[in-house]
Amino acid sequence: AMDSYRDIQAPVVWLLAGLLALAAPAGAQAPQPQWPDPIPPITDADVQREQDKAAAIVDSLIPGAHGRVLTLKDDPLLKPGPALSASRLIEQVHSLARALRRHADIEPDRVQRVLGIALPHDAEGQRRGTTGTFDPGTYAWTVSRSSFVPEANTVRLSLDPPTLCLSVDELKAPLLADRFKMYVPTFGDDDRILFYKPVESQLTLYVYIAVDRLDTPTCGRTVTFDIAPSDD
């Protein structure tokens, strides 16, 4: 009998509580819960800004990332080109540094005319470039889409194995004579010396040379060319 009483008592208590709530004066409403201010929506620009920031941090922290673009898979094979000497590669670097003045100059057809060698499509049509014998290893010239200027390309000369190199003095002297300014990083893991100068249409040409060491460099391992809007 006691269990039956409890079974009846519970619904009655809830019913009385509901009637009392309905009978309460209108001005005696329970206080509304306090919620924090709404968080403003995240825009595409916010996401892009954070991605750019993260990419810059990663790029500055990964040793050796500047000589070879890191990808999730190996780059498609390049078609073979002629064997070249160190003096010829250095001459090509300086010819390109003099010729690149606007975005159109860094298109593959123009680059190959300046270099004096053909730059066909790779095995999957992703890049233009060629590879050939240099010293006891190989060189590769490539033209691919720029990672930070959508309307531009990046040109890179890379050597394999990484122990191969070009004389830093022979690379540097003509650039400085052609009024390039030089910047040497003083901290971080960036192994590149930067040469830069204004060109046309509010653009700046950047030439990055990855070296063996920053204090007294002797060995240039990769040379990268980019054209980007000049800083205000």
Image: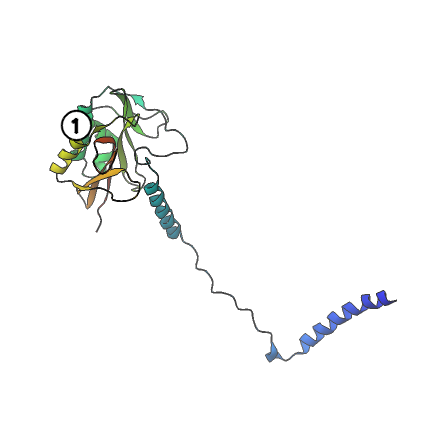
Instruction: Give percent across and percent down for residue 50.
Output: 38, 49
Q: Is residue 162 above or below residue 65?
A: above
Q: What residue appears at the point 86 percent right and 67 percent down from the top-left corner?
A: 2
Which quadrant holds residue 154? top left
Q: Residue furthest front?
A: 215
Which quadrant holds residue 227? top left
Q: Which residue is mark 1?
A: 91
User: Which secondary structure, mark 1?
Assistant: helix
Q: Residue furthest left?
A: 177
Callout 1 crowding tier (Cα within 10 Å): few <14, some 14–19, many ≥20: some
Specify whether residue 55 is in view.
Answer: yes
Instruction: Give percent across and percent down for residue 86.
Output: 20, 24
- In-front residue for pair 215/224: 215
Residue kind at label 1, given as amino acid type: Glu
Q: How many marks?
A: 1
Q: What residue appears at the point 24 percent right and 27 percent down from the top-left corner?
A: 165
Specify whether residue 94 is in view.
Answer: no
- In-front residue for pair 119/81: 81
Instruction: Give percent across and percent down for residue 206.
Output: 22, 40
On-image quarter of the N terminus: bottom right
Q: What residue appears at the point 40 percent right and 53 percent down from the top-left corner?
A: 43
Locate residue 63 relative to residue 220 in the image: left or right. Answer: right
Which quadrant holds residue 96? top left
- In-front residue for pair 168/25: 168
Q: What kind of colouring is applied to the model shown?
A: rainbow
Locate residue 95 relative to residue 158 in the image: left or right. Answer: left
